[in-house]
Image (cartoon, rainbow, N blue to C red):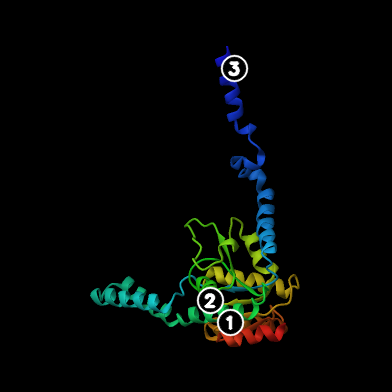
Amino acid sequence: MAVENNERLQKIVDSPSYRLAETDTGFLTRPELRPVRMQLELLKPEMILTENGVESTIVVFGGTQIIPRDEAEAALAAAKEKASANPSDKSAARELQRAESRHAKCHFYDEARNFAKLVSSTCQIDGKCEHVIVTGGGPGIMEAANRGAHDVDAKSIGLNITLPHEQAPNEYITPELCFQFHYFALRKMHFLLRAKALVIFPGGFGTLDELFDALTLRQVGRMQEIPIILFGREYWEKVVDFQFLADEGVVRDEHLDLVDYAETAEEAWKIIQRSA
């Protein structure tokens, strides 16, 4: 009888229903608990950033495919070799064209790194934690910006997101300021909560999503008035014809003033300083 009672008691304490709710991950991931998970994703980064004294941030967005010059040159050389060995292969020719385009943009990696270095060395002094660089925490332009802060022993933030294909944080983020999100909406909120400026380098769908999210909030007055700086006018004027939108009457002429352009780290920093 004692053995039977012990077995019953063990089944009770092993039952998921007996676990503390806060330690029951199976329970916390149920669809009904989505509001709680969203609140946690709001609170956790906010509390940790506050504890680390982060007063303000500068957000740097940009493409994952904009890589350091040495990597771009190696990729271009490999693409040239493949295309040369297969002259009739259209996919090889296409990859060569794309490799040439990526190589032509590798200077943006350098500018993102220089910008983060300039801002961080200027603003994180005497124990202050202002204008801290924040990125999406991944490769490409994000890596460059975190790397620039790391170059001058300054803090920087990474806001990673869980994706179907695993996204790993780059190695230059301050470890205690690297966060992982499930919800894009909460991640976007944290990008903007402390932001004093957005600096947008060339990128793809994700970069465009983040750009237009911020532009919309600025347009309708739902966020603080901060500069939105597009790095590389030639690229952006091909991607988005803002003047056309104004000419068509779907945005006001004054909404075009929501966007500034910069070509160098120093130029972008001067725009931010003027708006302070």
State if disc 3 and disc 1 touch (CB < 8 Å): no
Q: Disc 2 designates what residue? A: 148
Occupied quadrant, residue 133: bottom right
At x 39%, y 77%, the residue is 72
Q: Work out whether 101 lies above or below 169.
A: below
Residue 247 shows in the view: no
Q: Are marks 1 and 2 in contact (CB under 8 Å)?
A: yes
Q: What residue is disc 3 on?
A: 5
Q: Position of residue 39 (x, y in %)?
A: 69, 53
Label 3 secondary element: helix
Hey, which residue is sitting farthest left in the picture? 85
Q: Amino acid at mark 1?
A: Leu
Viewed as shown, does residue 243 lie left or right of 105? right
Q: Is residue 43 visible?
A: yes
Dividing the picture into quadrants, the one containing residue 44 is bottom right
Q: Position of residue 111 (x, y in %)?
A: 52, 82
The label number, if any, that marks residue 118 in the structure image: 1
Quadrant in the picture for the N terminus: top right
Q: Residue furthest right?
A: 221
The residue drawn where x is 60% and y is 79% is: 121
